[in-house]
Image (tube, grey):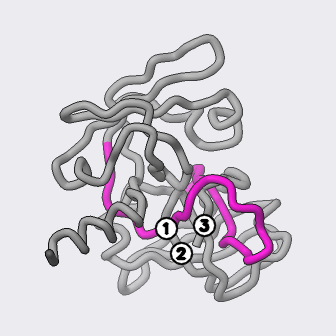
């Protein structure tokens, strides 16, 4: 479980084929402070398991299911990704409950740059539309954000200068794809309603 509050930007140092997918060595500083083998870590919103670790990097493995559903299929050596360690019971709960179970990808269709902040617009498919509400929570590339507006075919979020600075979002452009995880509560509510 995560909060969607990014701790740092990591960089993929190795991204190689393995029999059932890919293996990545990812550099970090802050997240390595108490990270251990078998810990969960959010990599641009994807919950992955640490399978090895050294003083400067940790290793994760991605199976075909993960690669087919997320932006990880486009990762390469030197790709920057957002990193967040799993939530501890003693942690402050900012953001919202994020599982790291990506529901799919959405495309950036417009970026309205303001003086220091920006409003970002994303494509919205029927698959995700029922789970998104204005002023509700959404997780995009591992970042907990608030939906600013929702219309047929798109939704938007407002990004403060701090978020643009401490995440990979300052490097993104129109037509880039990002991982989306809708609010888990919305999924449970829909599931209950379908059973009635």
- Evaluate if marks 1 and 3 touch, with contact meaning CB atoms under 8 Å apart: yes
Q: Which residue is mark 1?
A: 100
Structural crowding at the residue carrying mark 1, measured as other residues with C-alpha within 10 Å and reported as few (<14), some (14–19) or many (≥20) = many
Q: What residue appears at the point 38 percent right and 79 percent down from the top-left corner?
A: 63
- Evaluate if marks 1 and 2 touch, with contact meaning CB atoms under 8 Å apart: yes
- On whether residue 88 falls in the magenta region, the answer is yes
- On whether residue 85 falls in the magenta region, the answer is yes
Q: Which residue is mark 2?
A: 48
Quarter of the image for the N terminus: give it. bottom right
Label 1 or label 2, whichever lies nearer to me, is: 1
Residue 76 picture location, percent across and down? 48, 56
Residue 66 picture location, percent across and down? 37, 71
- Evaluate if marks 3 and 2 touch, with contact meaning CB atoms under 8 Å apart: no
- Foreground residue among 126 and 105: 126
Quarter of the image for the C terminus: give it. bottom left
Residue 139 picture location, percent across and down? 48, 52
Q: What residue appears at the point 44 percent right and 76 percent down from the top-left corner?
A: 62
Please say if 54 is above or below 102.
Answer: below
Q: Is residue 92 left or right of residue 159?
A: right
Structural crowding at the residue carrying mark 3, measured as other residues with C-alpha within 10 Å and reported as few (<14), some (14–19) or many (≥20) = many
Structural crowding at the residue carrying mark 2, measured as other residues with C-alpha within 10 Å and reported as few (<14), some (14–19) or many (≥20) = some
Q: Which residue is mark 3?
A: 2
Label 3 or label 2, whichever lies nearer to me, is: 3
Please say if 111 is above or below 68.
Answer: above
Q: Tell me the element at label 3.
A: loop
């Amino acid at each position: 479980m995560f909060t969607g509050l990014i701790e740092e930007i990591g960089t993929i140092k190795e991204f190689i084929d393995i029999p059932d997918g890919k293996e990545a060595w990812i550099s970090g500083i802050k997240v390595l402070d108490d990270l251990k083998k078998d810990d969960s870590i959010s990599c641009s919103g994807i919950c992955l398991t640490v399978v090895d670790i050294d003083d400067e990097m940790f290793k994760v493995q991605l199976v075909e299911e993960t690669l087919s559903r997320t932006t990880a299929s486009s990762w390469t050596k030197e790709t920057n990704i957002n990193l967040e360690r799993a939530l501890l019971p003693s942690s402050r709960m900012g953001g919202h409950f994020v599982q790291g179970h990506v529901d799919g990808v959405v495309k950036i269709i417009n970026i309205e740059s303001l003086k220091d902040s920006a409003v970002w617009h994303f494509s919205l498919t029927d698959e995700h539309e029922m789970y998104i509400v204005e002023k509700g929570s959404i997780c995009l590339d591992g970042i907990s954000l608030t939906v600013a507006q929702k219309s047929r075919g798109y939704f938007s979020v407002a990004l403060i200068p701090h978020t643009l600075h401490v995440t990979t979002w300052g490097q993104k452009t129109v037509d880039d794809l990002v991982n989306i995880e809708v609010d888990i509560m919305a999924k449970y509510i829909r599931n209950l309603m379908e059973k009635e």
